[in-house]
Every structure is written in C-alpha cells, then in structure tokens.
Amino acid sequence: GIRFEEMEAAEADAGTELLAAMLSPAGFEQVQMVRALQDVLAARGIGPADRNSDRYSLSVYDEPAAGALWGLRLERSEE
C-alpha cells in the first residue's frame, strides 16, 4: 500500500473519498477520529515521535469494479 503522507493531495482526497463510500457514516467518522487521535498523541509526546494522522497505508487488492472480487485495507504504518 501507500501511506497518505506519500500521496499527492488529490490522491489522498480520493483515498478518503473511497473510505467514505465504503464505510457507514459512523464507521467513517470513527476511522477519521482514530486517525486524528494520532496527532493528539504526538502533540502530547505519547508514542513514537513520527506519529501522525497520515501514517496510515491504504492498499487496494485487485481492480475495483461492480461484480468483481477485490479488497481494501487501511492500516497504521509503523515504519
């Protein structure tokens, strides 16, 4: 996958829009809150110094299409 911090602004926006389209409104809000929490923890000096909301990777498996089998993965990057 690719981390949000490595994406161009338009790519990051598209990734966020993809998450919003795939998740329920409550699920999307929870993901956004968890991501934002990384910035809060970093500001308080809790955890790794490079912690931030854009250190999440988005991976797409296969070609997304109606009727096709494909997958999406969002995970916090430790590297």
Image (cartoon, helix red, strand yellow):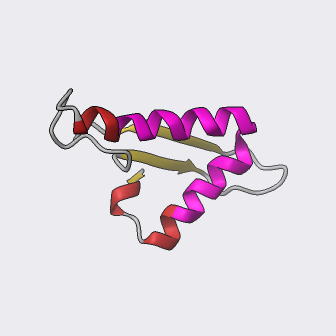
Q: Quadrant of residue 5?
A: bottom left
Relative placement, left or right, of 53 versus 50 is right
Q: What count of labels does the image hold?
A: 0
> At 25% across and 40% down in the image, what residue appears?
51
Determine the residue located farthest toward the right in the rendered image.
67
Determine the residue located farthest toward the front in the rendered image.
44
- Coordinates of residue 33 in the picture (x, y in percent): 51, 36
- Coordinates of residue 68 in the picture (x, y in percent): 77, 49
Q: Which residues are magenta?
A: 13-38
In the depicted structure, whether residue 35 falls above or below residue 21:
above
Q: Quadrant of residue 77?
A: top left
> At 56% across and 57% down in the image, what residue appears?
15
- Coordinates of residue 71 in the picture (x, y in percent): 63, 42
> At 70% across and 32% down in the image, what residue appears?
26
Look at the magenta stretch and give its main secondary structure: helix
> At 49% across and 62% down in the image, what residue appears?
12
In reply to whether residue 20 is colored magenta, the answer given is yes
Image quarter in which the C terminus is found: top left
Relative placement, left or right, of 55 versus 36 is left
In reply to whether residue 21 is colored magenta, the answer given is yes
Pick the front one: 48 or 78: 48
- Coordinates of residue 18 in the picture (x, y in percent): 65, 54
